[in-house]
Image (cartoon, rainbow, N blue to C red):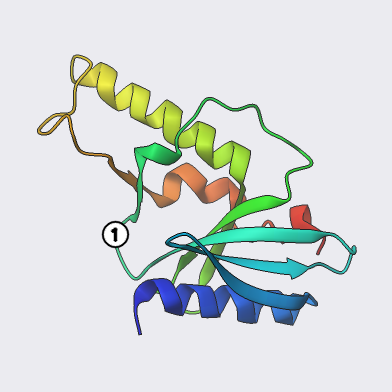
Amino acid sequence: MTTAILGQLAVAQKLKSLGACNIVAQKEGNKTFVTFIAPNGKTYKVATRAKTSGTWQTTTDYGAPCALDKNDNEFWVFIDLGREPNTFYITPLSWIRNDIYEAHQVYLEKHGGHRAQNDESTHHAISVKRIAGWEDNWEQMGF
């Protein structure tokens, strides 16, 4: 099983343990999301990012200047499978999109407006320190 699938399963198990129901993994294009109904009756949609070591990997394509939407029903759940028990970080979609955008702008400024090696690359790494404040922040999804 891939790290991505293990991450989705771990997030689904955690959601079930917190009282979520109708937990479904569904594909949209080439991406898989987990949808569920929280105890507050609202439906949420999460993208998962899993890692066993190092940083989480994503793309700058997700970055966009966004204001934090306190009513967001879409989230990214980062899971560190390399720690026991697994560690979860729950970020609103609006927040992580803005964070990716801002971090990438800072990176470009440090390198004269370009990628250090390849301007065509969209690779983007997310470290624990960037999302540490969102650890186990399940209450924003009605738990």
Residue 68, image quadrant: top right
Along the line of sight, which residue is nearer the eye, 47 or 53?
Answer: 47
**Residue at the spot x=20%, y=38% of the render?**
121
- Which residue is farthest bottom? 1
Residue 76: percent from left, percent from top: 56, 54
**Residue at the spot x=53%, y=80% of the render?**
9
- Which residue is farthest left? 117
Residue 41, image quadrant: bottom right
Q: Residues within 10 Å of mark 1 (few under 14, many from 20)?
A: few
Along the line of sight, which residue is nearer the eye, 106 or 69?
Answer: 69
Q: Which residue is mark 1?
A: 54
Q: Residue 84: in sight, yes or no?
A: yes
Amino acid type at mark 1: Gly
Q: Residue 83: in sight, yes or no?
A: no
Whether residue 112 is situated above or below residue 136 in the rendered picture: above
Q: Quadrant of the C terminus?
A: bottom right
**Residue at the spot x=59%, y=74% of the render?**
25
**Residue at the spot x=33%, y=55% of the render?**
55
* Dot 1: element: loop
